[in-house]
Image (spheres, rainbow, N blue to C red):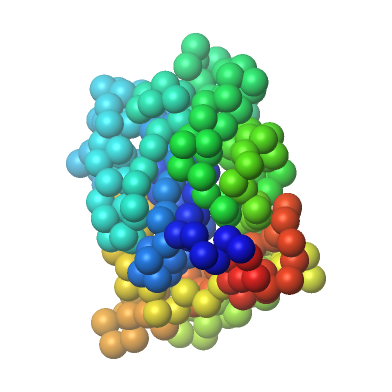
């Protein structure tokens, strides 16, 4: 039985900040419960937009130093979440943020999506064989919102996990349609957000009937918020002073409000179903 062994969770993310936005509560919960939690990040996020005006010259259009800066942000986020360890796929700086499809960044010689899939699968397989997680988390086939790096992360994770003897389950991290709808409705009703609260249907979501696993992370929202704040070049967190964890939400550089629900949501892509409804390790 896997339960007799140390629980090990490995999450594969495309850029710094993805780990905190989509799975920050999950990382903090399992780390607090004593599991070994590893995040593998595929790029340094060099092509990201920059929220603070005073840091704008770090961008790829100027000094091109954003990747190194974001690595520091990621370290801060990992510390806030209690992360056991962090690795970059192929080593730090091996793969570069590809940007969105059709942009010049996608043609960079080190762009993640220009790399050979087989080689990237081998790099991830080596990490899986070394770290031996029972549970692996990545994105769905659409990459959550269609970013090419997210899609590539999905592709190589599914291939590598199928080779790894230790992996019992693979999950895709997703956003719940009903949770996002409730969160946005609450923001509209409360008012006072500095961001644009989008209409129903604007944010990418997954229908609830497709979701297999709902993880309660409410007790770990303080850690998640601290991790989000660590990624200050990419996003801004807003919360009312009197109800910080009920009102907390964030926006990327597009200034579109995104709620932070007290649960995180997953689709089981591989592995046994019994026990997985409320615990990534349940029943193993």
Outermost residue to the top: 109
Residue 142 occupies which quadrant of the picture? top right
Above or below for 101 versus 239? above
Outermost residue to the right: 209
Image position of 68 (left or right of 234): left
State the image coordinates of residue 11 (x, y, percent, origin top left).
51, 49
Residue found at x 47% / y 74%: 217
Residue found at x 46% / y 36%: 130
Above or below for 23 versus 32? above
Image position of 21 (left or right of 264): left
State the image coordinates of residue 166 (x, y, percent, origin top left).
59, 46
State the image coordinates of residue 33 (x, y, percent, origin top left).
40, 71
Nearest to the observer: residue 72 or residue 184:
72
Residue found at x 29% / y 87%: 242
Image position of 91 (left or right of 100): left
Above or below for 119 versus 69? above
Nearest to the observer: residue 59 or residue 109:
109
Residue found at x 35% / y 27%: 92
């Amino acid at each position: 039985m896997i339960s007799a062994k140390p629980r090990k969770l490995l999450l594969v993310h495309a850029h710094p900040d993805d780990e905190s936005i989509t799975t920050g509560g999950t990382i903090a919960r399992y780390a607090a419960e004593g599991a070994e939690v590893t995040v593998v990040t595929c790029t340094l996020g060099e092509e990201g937009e920059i929220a603070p005006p005073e840091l704008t010259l770090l961008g790829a259009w100027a000094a091109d130093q954003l990747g190194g800066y974001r690595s520091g942000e990621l370290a801060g986020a990992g510390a806030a979440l209690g992360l056991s360890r962090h690795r970059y796929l192929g080593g730090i700086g091996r793969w570069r943020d590809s940007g969105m499809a059709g942009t010049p960044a996608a043609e960079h010689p080190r762009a993640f999506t220009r790399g050979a899939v087989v080689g990237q699968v081998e790099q991830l397989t080596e990490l899986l064989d070394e770290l031996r997680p029972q549970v692996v988390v990545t994105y769905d086939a659409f990459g959550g919102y269609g970013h090419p790096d997210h899609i590539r992360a999905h592709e190589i994770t599914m291939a590598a996990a199928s080779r790894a003897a230790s992996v019992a389950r693979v999950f895709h991290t997703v956003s719940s349609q009903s949770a996002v709808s409730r969160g946005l409705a609450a923001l509209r009703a409360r008012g006072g957000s500095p961001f644009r609260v989008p209409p129903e249907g604007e944010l990418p979501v997954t229908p609830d009937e497709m979701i297999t696993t709902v993880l309660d992370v409410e007790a770990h929202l303080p850690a998640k918020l601290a991790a989000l704040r660590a990624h200050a070049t990419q996003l801004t967190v807003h919360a009312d002073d009197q109800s910080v964890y009920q009102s907390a939400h964030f926006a990327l550089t597009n200034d579109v409000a995104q709620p932070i629900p007290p649960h995180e949501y997953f689709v089981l892509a591989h592995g046994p179903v019994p026990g997985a409804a409320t615990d990534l390790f349940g029943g193993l």
